[in-house]
Image (cartoon, helix red, strand yellow):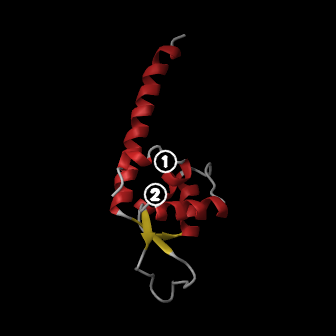
Amino acid sequence: MKDVTSLLPLSRSLVHLLLALHEGERHGYAVKKRVEEMSGGIVRMGPGTLYTTIQRAEDLGLIEESDERPPPGEDQSQRRYYELTPFGTQVLAAEVERLGAFVDHARTALSGVRGK
């Protein structure tokens, strides 16, 4: 298995994809809508970015197609549903740690600027 830190830093679109799937399995369009909701509409993933990011995440072993399907009345057979893998969860946690450390450093650096 790959080293978690070898994949860092993650692209913005990959972070958003993993966060959306951390909440539960989703199909591509549902990921797109959830990313928009989580970002307050600031981040919008077009089809090219979305499906390229999904493919990259699959290739890296961060997500996989889910075997679970919605109830027959709610299922659309052409949709592929994705879920986060345990490795994907580890990578997402490492990226959140990395970003948190960066933000902490930036806040400290800017704390002296505020008073000027």
Give the residue type that dot 2 points to.
Answer: Leu
Distance CA(mark 2)–CA(mark 1): 10 Å
| Residue positioned most to the bottom | 72
The residue to which callout 2 is attached is: 18
Give the residue type that dot 1 points to.
Answer: Leu
Q: Secondary structure at mark 1?
A: loop
**Residue, x 45% and y 25% (percent of image)?**
107
**Residue, x 43% and y 64% (percent of image)?**
63
The residue to which callout 1 is attached is: 10
Measuring from the top left, give residue 53's x and y in whole percent: 56, 59
Measuring from the top left, give residue 34's x and y in whole percent: 53, 60
Measuring from the top left, give residue 13's x and y in whole percent: 55, 53
Cβ atoms under marks 2 and 1 closer than 8 Å: yes
Q: In the displayed structure, does residue 42 sit left or right of residue 68?
A: right
**Residue, x 52% and y 76% (percent of image)?**
80
Q: Secondary structure at mark 2?
A: helix
Q: The N terminus appears in which quarter of the rendering?
A: bottom left
